[in-house]
């Protein structure tokens, strides 16, 4: 998976809002009226995401790495992700 694929999935499918003002691009989602930081990516991120970083992003998004791949491949829908987010302990409020 590469940075562009993940960025596109977060914004279009996950309906995440981007904050590009800092050292990283932060992605925020709204679940049940509350805003949460879903994950962050580097401004300079290009190409494939390393497996270790993919694991960290998965944890931040409250998904396993295979679930994250399925989210990007569109076999996990936004609503399913939000349900998992809440079940697995939503945190990182904005």
Image: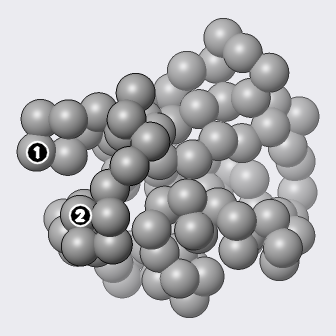
Residue 28: x percent and y percent? Answer: 42, 35
Left or right position of 85 against 94: left
Residue 53 vertical placement versus 17 (above, below): below
Q: Is residue 83 visible?
A: yes
The residue carrying mark 2 is 86
> Which quadrant holds the C terminus?
top left
Residue 71: image x %, image y %? 44, 73
Question: Among all residues in the image, which is located at the extreme bottom?
Answer: 66
Q: Which mark is residue 32?
A: 1
Instruction: Please tell me which residue is depicted at 64% across the width and 18% down the height of the picture.
Output: 20
- For residue 54, which numbered disc appears in the image? none
Q: Secondary structure at mark 2?
A: helix
Contact, mark 2 vs mark 1 (Cβ under 8 Å): yes
Please determine whether, in this image, residue 30 is positioned above or below residue 43: below
State the image quarter where residue 62 is shown.
bottom left
- Residue 76: horizontal and vertical position, in percent? 33, 78
Residue plotted at (69% across, 50% down): 4
Extreme residue in the top direction = 21
- Pointer 1: residues within 10 angstroms few (<14), some, or many (20+)? few
Label total for image: 2
Q: Quadrant of residue 51?
A: bottom right
Q: Residue furthest left?
A: 32
20 and 74: which is toward the camera: 20
Q: Give the answer, above or below, for where 92 lies relative to 23.
A: below
């Amino acid at each position: 998976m590469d940075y562009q694929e993940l960025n596109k999935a977060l914004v279009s499918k996950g309906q995440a809002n981007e904050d590009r003002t800092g050292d990283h691009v932060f992605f925020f989602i709204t679940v049940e009226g509350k805003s949460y930081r879903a994950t962050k990516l580097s401004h300079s991120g290009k190409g494939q995401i390393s497996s270790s970083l993919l694991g960290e992003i998965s944890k931040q998004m409250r998904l396993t790495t295979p679930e994250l791949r399925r989210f990007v491949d569109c076999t996990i829908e936004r609503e399913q992700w939000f349900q998992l987010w809440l079940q697995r302990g939503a945190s990182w409020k904005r």
